[in-house]
Each structure stands twice: as C-alpha cells, then as structure tokens.
Image (cartoon, rainbow, N blue to C red):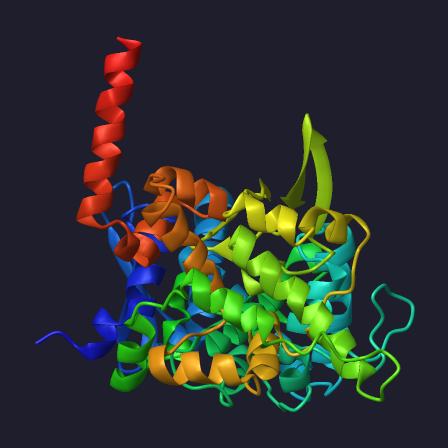
Amino acid sequence: MQARSESDNWVQSLRTIIRDSLGTNWQIKPNKGKTKIRIRFDDGTRVEKMLGIDWSRAEAPKILKTVQEIHHLTIKKKVPLDEAVERLRKTRNKALNLAATPNPKLLLNAWEKYENHKVNVIGDVTQATWNQEYGGKPNHGILPPRNKPQGKTYLRLREIKADNANELLLRIGEKFEHGTRGRQIRVQHIAAFLRWATSKQSGFLLPEENWNPPPKNALGEYVGRKSAEKQKKSSAPTVAIEDKELLELINSLPIDVDKSQKKHRLRDRAMEWDLAIKLSIVYGLRPNEVSHEYLEIRKNKNEYIWCSYCKKAGGGTTKPRRLWPLHPEWEKQWNLLERIKQKDPLPRMKAGAGDAFKNYLRFNDVWKRLKTQQGVVPYSFRHSYSKRAHQIYKLSDTEVAAFMGHSVPVHNSTYAQWSTESMLESSMERALKFRDVTS
C-alpha cells in the first residue's frame, strides 16, 4: 500500500518540478523520515544518497534547492557526488548556526522593503491597496499616508513570533476560518513576500534555510478547506435586486436632512453612499471599484467613465475597461458623469469595500428587509446589472462579461442563472432576423 506521504500534494509538486527542470534521471524518495536522492547516469549506473533533510512539506524548498545544487555541481562542475553532498551539508550547517537566534525585527524590516518593491519598483500594487490589504507601521511620507499601524496582513504579521516559513504560514491564517478567502489571501501574501525576501531580487534579506516557502501550488494545507456548511453557503447563487427595490433602497437614504440641523453629517454620509450605490447599480461595479482612485472621465465622441481597477484572479489579472450604463436614463437622471468629473465624495472604506457596504446598509430598513427575505449582499448590485443585461437588454454572455470586466468562463460560472431559455430563444430570433437583413 502506498505511503500517505508519497501521495501528498507537495510531493507530487516537488517531483514534477525536479523532473521538468533536471530530467527523469533525477528522483527523490523517503527513507525512514529522511530524503534520499536517486540518480541514473548516462552510462547506466545508478546511485542513491541520503541528503540529511527531513521528508516533510516544510522542508520541500530545501529539498528542491539541494537537489538542484547537487545537479549543478555534479553535471556542470564535474564534482564527485559524495563531495558535492558533503559540501552542501557543511554549507547548510553553517547557515543554520547563523540563523539559530533569529532577529525578532528581521521579518518586519524585510516587510518594509517589500512594500517599496511592490508599490514603487514594480508597481503592481497601489499605495492605497497596500495600506488596506498589506499594510505597515505609521508612515506620513506616503500618499495616502498611514497615520497608525494598518493593513490586514501586517497587523497579523507583527503579532506572530516564528522561526521559519512553515511556522509563519501556519500561524498567519489562524484567525480566519479554514478555506476562506481571507485566510487564502493572508497565506498568499506571506508566501509571496518570503519568496522575494529569500531571493537574489531582495539581496537575500532572509536566510533561505529558514524562510524559503513551499511552491505556489503547495499552499493548500495552510489555507485548509471550508466546512460543509460554508461550502454550501458560498456555492449558493448571489441574489439580484429588482429595479423597483433598487429605487426603493436609494429613496430610503437620509439625504433630505436640513444642512442647518445637527444631523447634517448623517446627510453628508448618505450623499456619499447614494453615489456609491448608484455607481454600483448603473455600471455593475465591484465594491472595490467604487473609488475615485479607479474612476475617471474619458471622451470618444461622447464622455464616459473609465475604470482602471485590475483584479488578480485565477493566476491572471483583469483589464481596465470602459463602463457601460444599464439603464442609460439612470446615468443621466442621477448625473453620474458630472459627479465623477467633479469628484463628489465617496465613502472611505478602511475595513474593505465589501465590509464597508455591509456596515453602512445594516441599519437601513429596506436593506434589512431584503436581506431577511432574499439574502442580498453588496455583490447583489453587480448581479442586478448582469440580470438586467441578459433579461432586459438580451445581451450575450460574451458581451456582458466584457462589460463587467471578467472572462466568459467566470461569467458563465457565476451569472449563468440569468441566461434563461426564453432569453436564449429571443437572442436566436434576433440573430435570424439580422441574418435575413444582411444576407
């Protein structure tokens, strides 16, 4: 019977990397809890050698690096195998001695440099997003500034005392439920950080022996799996809100308070959310996209709103897009182009956009009724846009996916419920009429 460790994901991933990079002649296997390397040379001879490394997921990066270095020494440098293994063992022991007493500030100092790398050097994260999702200690020299310790990952990172990558990755997600998106994001953030901090790109800020994380596709055990109840809840389709209910919700916002009254702050906040909700409804925006950071006015014959937000998903990144209003009359009636042009205030969403929507609307009587009766969530505004696009405007999946800024497979997996049979019949009728006119 095959040992459990033989079939673990990290083992399969590691063996695939070794096979693809070094060839099928280089193999690894467990032996009494330790790692053994098996090499078949071109002359047909076979050699096995114990590496002195534990056979475990936590040691996967060390196993891979050691095998790669042995390959380099024996094949490229023509060093005898025994000498190559012994040389690497001495180097490893020296590194372990140097890292025996880790500096408690080592991780946080490296994290500061990682912020500069991500925001200023390669620029794949905006400062606002970094402050919210990654974070760091107070910093008044950046825009937007951090006036206090901030960021979901940083606030968790500074609480943890860990001596190695495995321990840090195990603990970073402890406050989040298994398999949740929040836990997955924290684990991914830290793994990417450690990958950079132990690389040449960072100048080897952290010693590889202790801090090299597992490969990207071997993080599942740190993220965990959702409970059956959570899986059932997350797989349930998001409810769309009907047009009449959307209008009822908007009309319920307290924007008619007299400015001279003490409740004018209530009105100011309601005006911010009035704009945020109307943008979400008319353009099908994600909660994160409701920000002047991502929205601007452009012109091509007519003025329109452009969204520059790029979402990382499925190993790729979505593209910026033009926003198309549904219904166009709501765009005009609510003066949305002008309100974006003059940068009317939008809500500050420190806790995260989705949570900000929930926290504001939870006291609204209309929202409470819709949530109780139908189970609406902030993403229901976006789903309402999709439903409107399919069932009222009879647009195809490809068209609506482009309007909403995601791929057709994502659209089909999430919004296919709006592609009803009657709608498809109408689409086919339109297509046939178009063929008759143009042929």
**In which quarter of the view is residue 278 placed?**
bottom right
Quarter placement of the N terminus: bottom left
Name of the residue lying farthest toward the left: 1
Q: Residue at x 20, y 78 (%)?
A: 4
Left or right: residue 404 versus residue 395 is right
Which corner quadrant holds the C terminus?
top left
Q: Nearer the viewer, residue 45 or 284?
A: 284
Residue at image position (54%, 78%) is 165
Up the image or down, 44 lies above or below 15; here it is above
Q: Residue at x 72, y 69 (%)?
A: 272
**Can residue 295 be seen by looking at this rendering?**
yes
Instruction: Please say whether residue 325 is visible from this viewpoint.
Output: no
Compared with 128, 78 (above or below) is: above
Between residues 311 and 6, which one lies in front from this camera angle? 311
Q: Residue 385 location in percent, x, y?
A: 45, 54
Q: In front: 13, or 249? A: 249
Q: Residue furthest right?
A: 141
Q: Residue furthest top?
A: 439
Q: Position of residue 69 (x, y in %)?
A: 49, 56
As drawn, 101 above or below 438: below
Residue pictured at 62% horizontal, 77% vertical: 356
In front of the other: 236 or 337: 337
On the rendered structure, is 180 left or right of 87? Answer: left
For residue 342, above or below residue 228: above
Name the quadrant containing residue 18. bottom left
Q: Give percent across and percent down for residue 65.
A: 48, 61
Name the spot of residue 129 as percent of width and height, x first. Answer: 68, 64
Report the side of 402 relative to 161 (left or right): left
- All told, the count of numbered labels is 0
